[in-house]
Image (tube, rainbow, N blue to C red):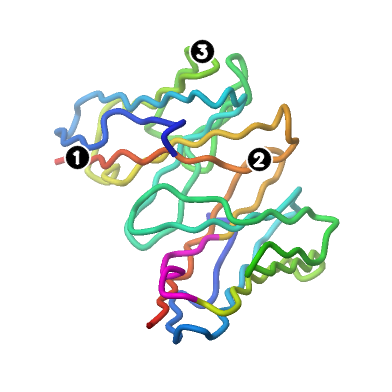
Amino acid sequence: SQQGEEDPQALSIQEGENATMNCSYKTSINNLQWYRQNSGRGLVHLILIRSNEREKHSGRLRVTLDTSKKSSSLLITASRAADTASYFCATDRMGDMRFGAGTRLTVKP
Amino acid sequence: DADVTQTPRNRITKTGKRIMLECSQTKGHDRMYWYRQDPGLGLRLIYYSFDVKDINKGEISDGYSVSRQAQAKFSLSLESAIPNQTALYFCATSDYRTSAYNEQFFGPGTRLTVL
């Protein structure tokens, strides 16, 4: 079964609002990563957080990791229409990568 | 990512046929991965390779085999294709040797339809 599960499955917001996506996983991990996918194209890496980190920032992205709860969140601030895409979390355990089913984000202009 | 290429990009085949999907990379990365994605779902790992002599089964390896012909090439074979193998297949690479992380760089995907 898939390691990560994202919540919500779909999210629709207005441009300028913040978007928060959550990910839960089942086993111990080395790191957790977030990816973006546009319309069936290849995924693009956004940000990685190591298992000993609790929070990380990259531009408008903020990721948190709670290993005690086996959960992570991705916050996109000041969203833009161009942020419309599917977002996936992925766990890395000794090189074995497991992806969740994704959150479909729609940002309305 | 143009540094990771997949051929063919689209393929329609019939049940029972053997088919090979190929992946090449010019990034010099040591690790290579094969995933499949079904509509509305995330990616599932089929096989992954840490180097030419190190190949590992992923979550859904049954019905598939792989070959790492060189550091830059990783092929996925469907021995006898069946309709439920219809999916979008992605190859990915990572530079673990340098970065010690598995940040994945994806190819454009191969859309496979098994009739």
Nearest the eye: A7 or B26: B26
> Three-letter amino acid code at disc 3?
Ala
User: Crowding near pointer 3: few (<14 within 10 Å), some, many (20+)?
Assistant: few
Disc 3: which residue: B70
- Is residue B26 depicted above or below A7 in this figure? above
Asked whether the residues under marks 1 and 3 belong to the same chain, the reply is yes
Q: Is residue B105 magenta?
A: no
Looking at the image, is mark 1 or mark 2 nearer the viewer?
A: 2
Q: What chain is tagged by disc 2?
A: B
The quadrant of the picture occupied by the N terminus of chain B is top left
Disc 1: which residue: B114
Q: Quadrant of residue A68?
A: bottom right
Q: What chain is tagged by disc 3?
A: B
Q: Quadrant of residue A32?
A: bottom right
> Three-letter amino acid code at disc 2?
Asn
The quadrant of the picture occupied by the C terminus of chain B is top left
- Residue drawn at x 34%, y 54% is A40
- Is residue B55 depicted above or below A78 in this figure? above
Q: Which residues are magenta?
A: A80-88
Disc 2: which residue: B102
> Three-letter amino acid code at disc 1?
Val
User: Crowding near pointer 2: few (<14 within 10 Å), some, many (20+)?
Assistant: many
- Residue drawn at x 60%, y 45% is A97
CA gap, disc 1 to disc 2? 31 Å
The x and y percentages for residue B83 are: 22, 43
- Residue drawn at x 50%, y 50% is A44
CA gap, disc 3 to disc 2? 19 Å
Q: Earlier in the sequence, mark 1 or mark 2?
A: 2
Marks 1,3: beta carbons within 8 A: no
Q: Secondary structure at mark 3?
A: strand
